[in-house]
Image (cartoon, rainbow, N blue to C red):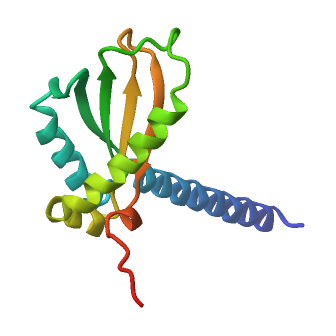
């Protein structure tokens, strides 16, 4: 192979490798640094709601914070009268909270209609009085609307 041909081949390979690296860098940048509009709106909603925290929302239940992660609004609650180490069974409480969360998002359809359009989930993370994680429950956009019974 002639010297000029080797040089041209080397330059061609170098250009292809450089183009691939630039493509990968741009793709990585877009994936990591461009947030969809929906996620920005969900984050703003969570930030605004978080201004009222902490607050007592029910007897022995305090809402500590609200934040957004991806397309999920996360509410963090503390049961002020529950100790994870002495609690016998939190499964019954978790099931009741799951049903309660779904009923809540269905009843408050004006607020959650907008979140449903954004494809937003709502998650409640529950902690005991010592800050130990108990469980979480979640409602998805399909849970927001009550199913109508047809005969």
In the rendered view, does 111 fall on the left or right side of 147?
Answer: left
Instruction: Decide: is 102 above or below 118.
Output: above
Residue 82 quadrant: top left
Residue 58 quadrant: top left
Q: Nearer the viewer, residue 5 or 53?
A: 53
In the rendered view, does 30 fall on the left or right side of 61?
Answer: right
- In the picture as drawn, the residue positioned furthest to the bottom comes out as 151
In the rendered view, does 129 fall on the left or right side of 46?
Answer: right
- Residue drawn at the location 39% of the way across and 22% of the way down: 127
- Residue drawn at the location 27% of the way across and 62% of the way down: 106
Q: Position of residue 78 (x, y in %)?
A: 31, 22
Instruction: Decide: is 66 above or below 7.
Output: above
Q: Position of residue 147 (x, y in %)?
A: 38, 74
Q: Quarter of the image containing the N terminus?
A: bottom right
Asked whether residue 72 appears in the rendered view, the answer is: no
Count of all numbered marks drawn on residues in the image: 0
Instruction: Decide: is 147 above or below 100.
Output: below
- Residue drawn at the location 17% of the way across and 47% of the way down: 44
- Residue drawn at the location 33% of the way across and 14% of the way down: 81
Asked whether residue 91 appears in the rendered view, the answer is: yes
Q: Quarter of the image containing the C terminus?
A: bottom left
Q: Nearer the viewer, residue 22 or 134?
A: 134
- In the picture as drawn, the residue positioned furthest to the front comes out as 151
Q: Nearer the viewer, residue 33 or 75?
A: 75
Instruction: Decide: is 48 above or below 133.
Output: below
Q: Position of residue 120 (x, y in %)?
A: 33, 57
Q: Position of residue 103 (x, y in %)?
A: 31, 55
């Amino acid at each position: 192979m002639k010297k000029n041909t080797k040089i041209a081949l080397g330059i061609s390979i170098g250009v292809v490798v450089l183009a691939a690296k630039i493509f990968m860098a741009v793709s990585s940048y877009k994936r990591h640094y461009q947030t969809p509009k929906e996620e920005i709106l969900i984050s703003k909603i969570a930030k605004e709601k978080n201004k009222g925290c902490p607050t007592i929302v029910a007897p022995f239940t305090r809402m500590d914070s609200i934040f957004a992660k991806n397309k999920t609004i996360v509410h963090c609650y503390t049961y002020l009268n529950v100790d994870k180490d002495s609690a016998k069974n939190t499964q019954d409480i978790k099931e009741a909270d799951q049903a309660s969360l779904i009923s809540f998002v269905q009843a408050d359809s004006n607020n959650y209609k907008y979140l449903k359009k954004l494809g937003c989930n709502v998650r409640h993370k529950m902690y005991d009085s010592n800050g130990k994680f108990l469980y979480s429950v979640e409602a998805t956009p399909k849970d927001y609307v009550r199913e109508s019974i047809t005969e």
